[in-house]
Image (spheres, coloured by chain):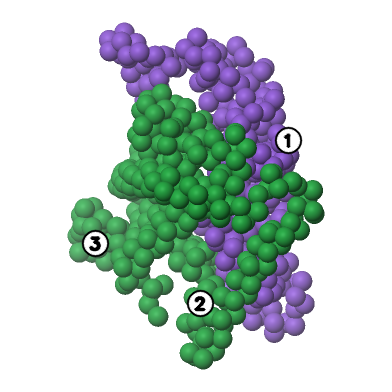
Chain colours: A green, B purple
Amino acid sequence: MKSSPVLDAGPAASAGKGADSIQFSSAEHPQHSPNNVNLTEPLQQNNPRRSMKLLNRGVFLPLLAGVAFLLLWEYQVFHKIFDLKKYQLPLPSAIAEAMRDNFSLLISYTGYTLAEAVLGMLIGSACGFLIALAATAWPRWGGGSLTMVAALNAVPIVALAPIMNLWFGDGIGSRAAIVTATTMAAMAINAYKGMAAVDPLALDLMHSYAAGKPAVFRYLRIRSSLPYVFTALKINATASMIGAIVGEFFFSSRGLGYLLSNSIKVAKMPLGWSCIVLAAIAGVVFYLVVERLEKVFIRWHPSRRS
Amino acid sequence: MKQNNAFMRGRLLPLLVWIFGLLVIWETVSWWLLNVARTPLAQSKLPYVHEVASTLWKYSGTLLKEGGATFGNAGVGFLIGALAGVLLAVLMSLSRTIEQLAFPYAIASQMIPVLGLAPIIYGIVRDEQVSRIIISGYITFFPVALNMLRGLRSVDPSALELMHSYAAKPWAVYWKLRFPAALPGLFSGLKIAAPLAVTGAILVELMGAQHGIGVIMLRNLYYGPSHTYMFWSTVLVGALLGMASYWLMSLAERLAAPWQPEFRPKGGGQ
């Protein structure tokens, strides 16, 4: 029983408008990734002057809120509300000072953690993509591997960390392995979705050209999976930083996570917070790089045309 | 015959073969490491499956109790975080100003390694119960808010126009149109968050708590090779908790939003 795309297109096409619109919205999913949903849309719709105004509002308001938040923090309003002491929640100025004092150490540790995250994410995403390929090419047996990978994704990172440490020692390898395990599933599931969400008409056309499976993959499925792949990469960019840092909590002699858990243990809260700040900055940079790549690679996609 | 056919065609058989095959490979490699390669700490690295299973069975009472504690705490935090997330999403969809205020920070906070905050929050609160709930809630909050907002926004414009032409009140638009449309988004957020909430709860337990699966996990890891089966059992329980949370959300989604393409008998058109 080979599953035929023509048969599958049947019910959706005949079910009329309701089903169509649902399918449409699910196909729209990857383009509505949170980062570009509401910040760019109004800019494209309106004329230049109006969009300038919107841009100002869209930037200034959050900026103002952020500054207000920092000021409230600095002048200990939060400390009074939540009854906290300064050694529990250090002031932003103290965090900045700790960051200045340990600048070179923090930078080198950030690089180390980022290296683990990038390495693990590349391996994990590649594995995930291969799994998606297999699952699309041989739905009956490959589908099982997709389920297994989804199960692996539900395994808490903290449970994986000690095991990976036993397997790969306490070098960069064990954290890269943790990140690999945590990033594989998002890529596999997303890429599979993209490869399955091919326009049925295009599939019919390929069939009418008597195109084989490899050709369908090469010209149709891989291309149509690209937006989903980049969504997965963006998810993984964040997840991989988390994986690397949490991995370092346990067995490491370097890295932001190691420094973070250590400085909390010896009650150097400002240093701990500066680790978090740097981890966030590194994560954002990583994310922006992936997003930049996305813009370059899927320029042809409707969501990218202005 | 017909039943057999349905069984073969379904996803059950390939999945069972996968699981069985992996178990056999695991057991073989474990045997090989122990008896042929003679790797140091062979059983810690890859223990015999049957030994782990028997340990799991033997200590099932303790594991169930501690796992339940973890799951309960994660669940409380998860519910609080999800409610707060839904609330924020509705507020953001109601008011452009609130959205402009909150949305950039919601996105930015997604990029902060949230789980990295666990030791800090534990350091501030110094209470395992509360910090577990805070972490789980915090992790749940953002995926739910963002996905819910996307759902609330993804309403078919012509349906919205129809509602307007009926002079529908705002609450009617929300209740009848936007909330049902947001359910798939809400559940995709919940499905992302549920295993993470369990992870967060276990993470706090590892930092120094009295109860929970993470506590036994750490203890048995420190005892070394003699407790390796127990350690692996706790890892297994942690994995099962994560999967159970995901599975529960999928089940709830099936019950609450059964009209989605992936639940159709033919699937999403492969």
- In three-dimensional space, the C-alpha distance between marks 1 and 3, rounded to whole angstroms, equals 56 Å
Q: Chain of mark 2?
A: A
Residue nearest the observer in this picture, B161 or B77: B77
Residue pointed to by mark 1:
B127
Residue A51 in the image: state x and y as whole percent.
Answer: 52, 85
Residue B106 in the image: state x and y as whole percent.
Answer: 59, 61
Report the amino acid beneath label 3. Tyr
Q: Residue at x 60, y 40 (%)?
A: A268
Left or right: residue A114 compared with residue A35 = left
Residue nearest the observer in this picture, B117 or B230: B117
Left or right: residue B267 compared with residue B94 = left
Q: Chain of mark 3?
A: A
Residue B162 in the image: state x and y as whole percent.
Answer: 66, 80
Q: Quadrant of the C terminus of chain A?
A: bottom left
In the image, which is nearer the foreground, mark 3 or mark 2?
Answer: 2
In the image, which is nearer the foreground, mark 1 or mark 3?
Answer: 1
Disc marking residue A41: 2
Residue nearest the observer in this picture, A262 or B214: A262
Report the amino acid beneath label 1. Asp
Does the residue at mark 3 contact the one at mark 2 (Cβ under 8 Å)?
no
Q: Residue at x 44, y 54 (%)?
A: A282
Residue A242 in the image: state x and y as whole percent.
Answer: 49, 45
Residue pointed to by mark 3:
A219
